[in-house]
Image: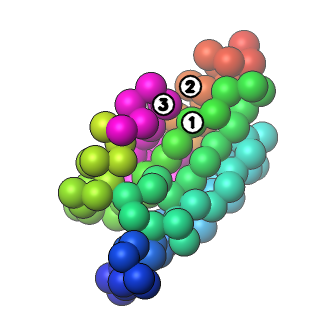
Amino acid sequence: MAPFAHGRFIVGRADATQAPIVKALETMGINVQDLSPVGDGCPDLLCGIGSVLFLIEVKVAKGKLREKQIEWRAKWSRVPYYVVRTVAEAIELGKIMRRNFLGQ
């Protein structure tokens, strides 16, 4: 399903891999807020661990960032931003974030 236009913004949608990725991150103690309905290039997930916030764009195996997503990422370049394609990648990112910011 492609994003659809609503006014002048492109309304987002969640990729099929998003729900299991969210579940894996939450199981690791990472707070997750779904931003996929925001659309217009905004990443899919806002995540937090300790006092650190980071963003995740969920893509399917061969999915590429769209132009709006590339523009959004450049505009918010000071915020940690990751592209995650699988549950395994999400778990690895979660481990790195826990180790770096919680010492676990």
Q: Quadrant of the C terminus?
A: top right
Residue drawn at (61%, 27%), measured in percent from left and top?
A: 97
Where does label 2 land, which residue?
Answer: 96
The answer to the question of whether label 3 and label 1 lie on touching residues, with beta carbons closer than 8 A, is yes
Secondary element type, mark 2: helix
Of residue 59 and residue 71, the one placed in the foreground of this image is 71
Mark earlier in primary sequence (1, 2)? 1
Where does label 1 land, which residue?
Answer: 54
Identify the mark at residue 80; answer none if there is no mark: 3
Q: CA distance from mark 2 to mark 3?
A: 13 Å
Identify the image quadrant of residue 2: bottom left
Secondary element type, mark 1: strand
Q: CA distance from mark 1 to mark 2?
A: 12 Å
Residue drawn at (45%, 72%), measured in percent from left and top?
A: 12
Give the percent coordinates (x, y) of residue 40.
Answer: 39, 64
In this picture, residue 16 sits left or right of residue 104: left
